[in-house]
Amino acid sequence: MTCEGCNTSSNVTAAPPEPLLVPDEGAAAMLGVGVSYFRQLLKAGSIGPQPVRLGRRQLHRPDLLRAWVSAGLPDRAAWLAMQREGGE
């Protein structure tokens, strides 16, 4: 069965690429917590992956946040130990 006049390639829009880095607001949204609570957790060392600096901005890698959640949300010390053991 065909659709006359249908051009599937023009009807489908590509999803925007996933950002490589996100600010605190994006990272907090990924985790489902508020920004101020996210920052408290980060400062306390409860969030494993450390942010990176780009200029004056503090940004987070979504891939590392996902891996951290998959690993069971270890604190920073445990996360860093896991990263050393894994060779990353």
Image (spheres, rainbow, N blue to C red):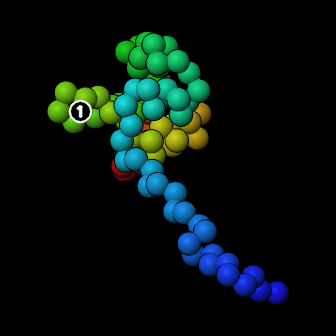
Residue 61 location, x and y as percent?
Answer: 39, 41
3 relative to 77, above or below? below
Q: Is residue 18 visible?
A: yes
Q: Is residue 84 left or right of residue 63?
A: left
* Label 1 environment density (alpha carbons within 10 Å; few <14, some 14–19, many ≥20): few
Q: Nearer the viewer, residue 66 or 35?
A: 35
Locate the N terminus and report the quarter of the image it occupies. bottom right
Q: Secondary structure at mark 1?
A: strand
Closer-to-camera residue (2/25): 2
Q: Estimate the x, y position of residue 58 in percent, counting from the top left.
A: 29, 28
Q: Residue at x 47, y 37 (%)?
A: 65
Q: Is residue 62 above or below residue 1?
A: above
Kind of residue sitting beneath label 1 = Arg
- Number of numbered discs overlaid on the protein picture: 1
Residue furthest toward the bottom?
1
Instruction: Check the image and name the residue furthest to the left.
Output: 55
Seen from the viewer's position, the closer of residues 74 and 56 is: 56
Residue at 72% x, 84% y is 4
Residue 85 visible, this orientation: no
Q: Nearer the viewer, residue 7 or 47?
A: 7
Q: Which residue is mark 1?
A: 53
Residue 2 spot, x, y in % from top left = 77, 86
For the point 51% across and 62% down, the residue is 14
| Residue 17 position by quadrant | bottom left
Quarter where residue 54 is shown: top left
Residue under the point 51% across and 43% down: 67
- Point out the residue furthest to the front here: 5
